[in-house]
Image (cartoon, rainbow, N blue to C red):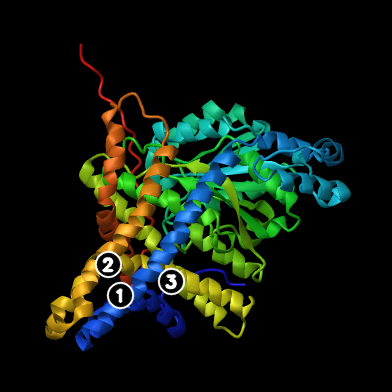
Amino acid sequence: MDLEIPSGKRKPLYRFFEIVPALLTYGALALLIILSLISPTLGAIYLLLIIIAMLVKAAGMAYRTINGSNSMHRAMRVDWAHRLTQLENPSESYAVVRDEQSSGFNFSRHVENLRLIAADPDAFPKPSQLYNAVIIAMYNESLDVLAPTIESVISTTYDNKRLIVVLAYEERGGPEAEKVAEALLKKYKSKFHDFLIVKHPADVPGELIGKGSNITHAGRHLASYLKDEKIPYRDVIVTTLDADNRPHCTYFDYVTYEFICHEDRKHLSYQPIAVFTNNIWDAPAPMRVIATGNSFWNIISSMRPHTLRNFASHSQPMDALVEMDFWSTKTIVEDGHQFWRSYFYFNGNYAVLPIHVPISQDAVLSYTFKKTLKAQFVQLRRWGYGASDVPYVATRIFSRRRNVRLLDGLSKLWRLIDGHVTLGCVSFMIAFGGWIPLLINSESSRDLVAHQLPITISRIQMVALIGLFITIFLSIKMLPPRPKHHKKHRSVFMILQWVLMPVTAIIYNSAASIYSQTRLALGLYMEKFDVTDKATFKPKENKK
């Protein structure tokens, strides 16, 4: 099966679906103007329907934000290492825990897992036979960024001697990147079952410059290593991390636990909650708002498993990755695209399982404020280029060789398109749409509905503030401790920053999404992964 995105000239059907996201986004904006020209009332009704639909969605998101946040904090308190140990001897463990009363996270499910595994132990692997491999993607990041990531892996409750770490660095990073990789190898090789460094060659024919090419090269090297070590692929879980990603201390125990408990484990991937909190106190206010919003979106997604997709760091069985030849080397959004590769490779028998503990990563922070503002837009436009999955999915669904159920494929395609179109146009419409019927139609002065529209929208926005208050409260709860180099008044700014949310939603989220969709529609493909700067904040020393 050809799993790759086409290179060069696209076929007409593929090219049509590349245009669809931008066509719908611009069409939604243009329709407001067209309807308002025909009748101010029609324009007002159209906008109100969209705003009401968004308000309903916002209510659901607020509910899932609260539940998801609670689930995350409860899962973080679970002793997953102990639960994993109990799977080693499920019969004995079941006899001990079956009569226990506990309100711990998913405890009743844990008891049921022990019962099922004890009934047929040969169908489930033992924890002691499994390994976790961690591929850390690196370009030109410094020791200050990479060392804390590796230290966080060491500090997990999982047995380090069952961990294989692969540092995947780029030849394009130059001699300094190789120097950093060698230093990390020397320092950490003895801490794990093994620590490998793998250099991805520059300018490989047919590969796009990006993370997918790097980690795929590292994955192939890992496959050869496992074969030489006589470690079966089916006994290895692979997790990809960016240079600044720090897994929660229970992450690998939790992932291994879920891997064992699901018999169809080969057709699953495991998605933690990406939260952008590592440097949240150091990042500028606009970046803090965007980072916190993205964190909550990932929390919300964890509560909707049927819509969950691979994002940033995730885990997948090694045997599945080997069969699929790992990740795509032809896209800058290899994480989300991996869902679709897996979905079509396994004939629709594929799902993403939520792991309700976080992997924390950096909010955008470059070396100057101006560079940080630009870097944030670059990151979001890369994420917005996930719209390039629309033609990939659509042409495989509308095909005589379709290998997934039609209704399932259509529902997934609809959610994919809806997500990108909504992100692109709704913020603009809510912010400015209320005045359009009044401004562009001369008859609006006599139209009561058009005159009341801005007032109605403002009242709806007042109701929506409830959701903002929930976000503020939970964001404060999620903050890591305030670093010593920041004074107490910084905490006040962590609340006041939310006045920037409408601005960041328009200038960054919507504008970046429209930018990416427009380039895709025009055939100006984004074929280079623009690495986000990862500056580290160093407080100034007091001069004596």
Say left or right for 425 vs 320.
left
Q: Nearer the viewer, mark 2 or mark 1?
A: 2
Q: Are marks 2 and 1 in contact (CB under 8 Å)?
A: yes
CA gap, disc 2 to disc 1? Answer: 9 Å
CA gap, disc 1 to disc 3? Answer: 17 Å
Q: Position of residue 418 (x, y in %)?
A: 43, 71
Query: Mark 2 sits on what residue?
Result: 457
Amino acid type at circle 2 is Ile
Which residue shows up at 50% across the image and 57% down it?
A: 335
Depth check, front residue: 424 or 71: 71
For marks 2 and 1 on the same chain, the one whose residue lies earlier in the sequence: 1
Q: Nearer the viewer, mark 2 or mark 3?
A: 2
Which residue shows up at 39% across the image and 35% down it?
A: 142
Say left or right for 348 vs 510.
right
Q: Position of residue 453 (x, y in %)?
A: 23, 72
Query: Mark 3 sits on what residue?
Result: 418
Residue 258 visible in image? yes
Which residue shows up at 24% across the image and 46% down it?
A: 371
Depth check, front residue: 401 or 313: 313
Report the disc number at residue 47: 1
Provide the secondary structure element on which disc 3 rests: helix
